[in-house]
Image (cartoon, rainbow, N blue to C red):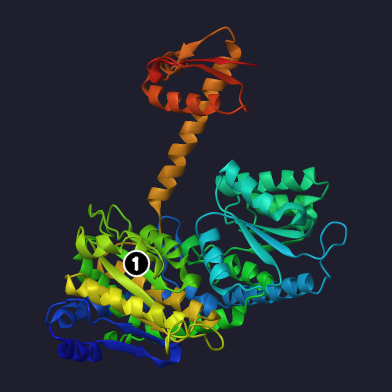
Amino acid sequence: MDDLALWQRYREYLCVCTDLGLMLDLSRMNFPEGFFTAMEPRMQKAFAEMAALERGAIANPDENRMVGHYWLRNPSLAPAGIISAEIELALRSIREFAESVHDGIITAHGGRRFSRLLVVGIGGSALGPQFVADALGSPADRLKPFFIDNTDPDGMDRVLAEIGVQLTETLTVVISKSGGTIETRNGMLEVKRAYESAGLKFPRHAVAVTGRHSELDRVAVEDGWLARFPMFDWVGGRTSVTSVVGLLPATLQGINIDGLLAGARRCDEVTRKPLTCGNPAALLALMWHHATGGKGEKDMVILPYKDRLLLFSRYLQQLIMESLGKERDRDGQLVNQGITVYGNKGSTDQHAYVQQLREGVHNFFVTFIEVLRDREGGSMRVEPDTTAGDYLGGFLQGTRRALYENGRESLTITVDKLDPATVGALIALFERAVGLYASLININAYHQPGVEAGKQAAGAVLKLQKEILDYLRGNKDASLTAEEIAAAIGNPAEAEAAFKVLLHASSNMDHGVAIERGEDICESRFRSRV
């Protein structure tokens, strides 16, 4: 197709959303003639299912729960007045608490003003807040944010070392709906010990975001934490960034959450309309279906040409892959659905993996994200009539063209500028697209049985570890292989898991396990040192 024909195709398939300051270009997707007409009945069914979801239909049958993240941006849409009131109360509480912190009314142990914010969570309880913090943070932040989002001891040490003596001025927000999420609990315990080691009272620095009557809620009440905020049953972790989960850290940081919510609300209004051609979320869902054959046959590469959107691909990994990666459809049929998501930032990607994207395995489609405004104020010329931002835009256009010339498909989302409203709109856009696409392929986007299976398997390994350690401590003269130990505790089939547990235990001083390495590492012998 020549350049003039491409220009005409661009004009024909450009979705312009003036109210959002956003455009979606489909012209470099090679969908066939009649694709939209053929898909329209399924698209209308998806719109109807989305409308039912927003009216309060049970969308998570595993837990018999509604899914209402859309109500967070417009509480008047909630199906019950009590839900609307809870949302509004939570927002008011967030603002009042943050204002008291910023004004020095609520202070740390010793009366110090808070200057740092440490968020402890995992998955949606960390990815959303991290993305927003990085995208919208500035040197003028009221509290500088830090995150612990794993149960890696060294990772925790790094974060706490970076905070350093400023721990005395650090407010910690612990986020866990159930209060029993192991990674978050471990992070909380490690952080609590750090405060106590510094001679500080942890409750004077601690805030809980959790479900009502959860274990974390109980601990916060009994120990007298500074505050508790609700996590609603009808909000899943990966869609929680416009709930207290994301809004409390953002407000404490100093980010304009009213703008964030307004952008998400406007996007909801645009993408709620059942007019496919003018609905950017519907168009995204249809392009995903075209690109992957409706079966996840190609990966989604996210390439934002803006440093502040670096974490967007990580955020979208969870939103899309946890929502769409399902073994069975809603009829119980084996389908193994999903779309793999990965990404980097432009123009960094020019020097990383665009070579493979253009000439390697053709197993992907690209979503470019373009931000028109380079910075607040003017830019210097790095060459005559050329700024650094001009180069950034040129690299985006060049990469898009180079990929298309080699038969690689791409979408381009263009936004006017990056501000709270734009970030809110992008979040809402992809949330809606995920819901619509899930309807198109007949899967449930709002449960995650695979995640729970992984947690159960991890629990079994830790139970095995306890049995191994108890056996070694009760048989201090024994020096045995992992296979022998597994047999001794009556679980010979778990020899491999036992070996991995023992290898880890002997590499750390915590459990008093010594190793005598054999020529064959699997024949190494283990004994208790305590």
**Left or right: 126, with 92 as reference point:** left
- Could you say which quadrant of the image residue 32 lies in? bottom left
Identify the residue at image location x=69%, y=62%. 117
Q: Nearer the viewer, residue 276 or 386?
A: 386
- Could you say which quadrant of the image residue 443 lies in? bottom left
Disc 1, SS = helix
Q: Nearer the viewer, residue 327 or 485?
A: 485
Residue 114, percent from left and from top = 77, 64
In the picture, the quarter occupied by the N terminus is bottom left
In the picture, the quarter occupied by the C terminus is top right
Residue 132 lies, with reference to residue 76, above or below; the image says: above
Identify the residue at image location x=20%, y=58%. 361
Q: Nearer the viewer, residue 110 or 324?
A: 110
**Left or right: 257, with 343 as reference point:** right
Residue 35 lies, with reference to residue 527, above or below; the image says: below
**Left or right: 55, with 394 as reference point:** right
Residue 204, percent from left and from top = 80, 56
Residue 393, percent from left and from top = 38, 80
Identify the residue at image location x=30%, y=61%. 339
Rate crowding at label 1 as few (under 14), some (14 to 19) or many (20 or more) other CA atoms within 10 Å.
Answer: some
Q: Residue furthest front?
A: 384
Residue 402 lies, with reference to residue 315, above or below; the image says: below
Which residue is denoted by mark 1 in the rendering? 350
Q: Residue furthest top?
A: 477
**Left or right: 341, with 78 as reference point:** left
Q: Amino acid at mark 1?
A: Gln
